[in-house]
Amino acid sequence: MYLEEGLFGFIEIDAVYITKAFLILFILFYAIFSLMIFRQIQIMAKTLPTSLSPWLKFIGIVQIGISLGLLFVVIGAF
C-alpha cells in the first residue's frame, strides 16, 4: 500500500450518501414545516371558527402523516 492511496482513504464519500443526507434533511424540514402548518390551523380554528375548520385539521393531519411516512421510507430505503 502506497502512502498516497491510504492518506485520504477515510474521506471517500459516495454520491449515494450525499443524496441520502440531502433527502433526509429535506424531508425532515418538510415534516417540521407540516407540524408548523398544523399548529397554524389549530390557532386559526380557535380564533376564527368556521365550518371549514374540521376539514383543514384533517388535511393538516394527513400532511403530517405523509411527511413522516415519507421520512421513514427514505430512511429505510437506503
Image (cartoon, helix red, strand yellow):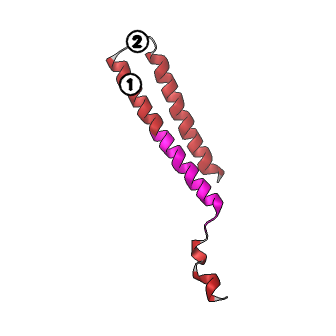
Q: Residue at x 58, y 49 (%)?
A: 23
> Residue 47 falls in which quadrant of the image?
top left
List x then y, in percent, for residue 8: 58, 78
Q: Residues within 10 Å of mark 1 (few under 14, many from 20)?
A: some
Image mark for residue 52: none
- Residue 29: x, y in percent? 48, 44
CB within 8 Å, label 2 to label 1:
no
**Dot 2 lies on which element?**
loop
Name the amino acid, label 1.
Answer: Gln
Query: In the figure, 12 relative to 3: above or below?
Result: above
Vertical position of residue 62 compared to residue 7: above or below: above
Q: Which residue appears at 59% of the width and 58% of the height?
A: 18
**Which contiguous range is marked in magenta?**
13-32
Name the residue located 61 percent from the left edge and 77 percent from the top edge.
9
Q: Residue furthest top?
A: 51
Disc 2: CA contacts within 10 A as few (<14), some (14-19) or many (>=20): few
Q: Position of residue 32 (x, y in %)?
A: 45, 40
Tag 1, which secondary structure? helix
Mark 1 lies on residue? 42
Q: Considering only vertical position in the picture, is 40 above or below 26?
A: above
60 to the left or right of 15 = left
Task: Check the picture and name the quadrant holding the N terminus.
Answer: bottom right
- State the residue at coordinates (65%, 50%): 77
Q: How many marks?
A: 2
Q: Magenta-highlighted stretch: main secondary structure?
A: helix
* Residue 27 inside the magenta-drawn segment: yes
| Residue at image mark 2 | 50
Query: In the drawing, does residue 23 fall left or right of residue 45?
Result: right
Earlier-in-chain disc, 2 versus 1: 1
